[in-house]
């Protein structure tokens, strides 16, 4: 499940970073003139954000998964321990 959550965040950040480019492509296909400066700004600032965020997402999720595995085990309920306790006490008698 944690891998699915990680991939969800990666896909969402990819979508958010590539969405402006897709919108500009569709808009320009319908005849709207988009200045070259806008393309340059998006390519220089928006796409590197995507490349910079992905390693943090993978690292954060790996640390989170590792911390979940390291949790100390909880003590078993007393009902599960009763047969063991009674067997050892009767064997000693």
Image (cartoon, rainbow, N blue to C red):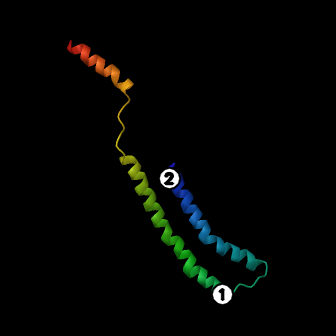
Give the residue number, with chain letter if any, for mark 2.
3
Q: Which residue is found at the position 31% from the left and 21% from the top? A: 84
Name the residue furthest front. Answer: 78
> Quadrant location of the C terminus?
top left
Provide the secondary structure element on which disc 1 rests.
Answer: helix
Name the residue furthest top. Answer: 93
Quarter of image, res 15: bottom right
Indicate whether 80 appears above or below 29.
above
> Are there few (<14), some (14-19), or many (20+) residues within 10 Å of tag 1?
few
Q: Which residue is found at the position 20% from the left and 15% from the top? A: 92
Determine whether, in the image, residue 55 is placed left or right of residue 33: left
Indicate whether 36 appears above or below 7.
below
Residue 36 bears which disc, if any?
A: 1
> x, y (%) of residue 39?
63, 83
Mark closest to the chain's N terminus, 1 or 2: 2
Name the residue furthest right. Answer: 30
> x, y (%) of residue 19?
65, 70
Provide the secondary structure element on which disc 2 rests.
Answer: helix
Q: Which residue is found at the position 34% from the left and 25% from the top? A: 81
Q: Which residue is found at the position 61% from the left and 68% from the top? A: 16
Please report contact status of discs 1 and 2: CB closer than 8 Å, yes or no: no
> x, y (%) of residue 33?
74, 85
Indicate whether 16 appears above or below 2.
below
Quarter of image, res 60: bottom left
> x, y (%) of residue 6?
51, 57
């Amino acid at each position: 499940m944690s891998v699915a959550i990680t991939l969800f965040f990666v896909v969402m950040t990819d979508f958010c970073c590539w969405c402006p480019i897709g919108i500009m492509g569709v808009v320009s296909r319908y005849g709207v003139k988009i200045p070259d400066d806008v393309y340059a700004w998006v390519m220089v600032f928006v796409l590197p954000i995507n490349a910079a965020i992905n390693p943090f997402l993978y690292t954060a999720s790996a640390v989170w998964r590792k911390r979940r595995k390291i949790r100390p085990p909880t003590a078993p309920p007393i009902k599960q321990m009763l047969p063991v306790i009674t067997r050892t006490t009767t064997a000693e008698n």
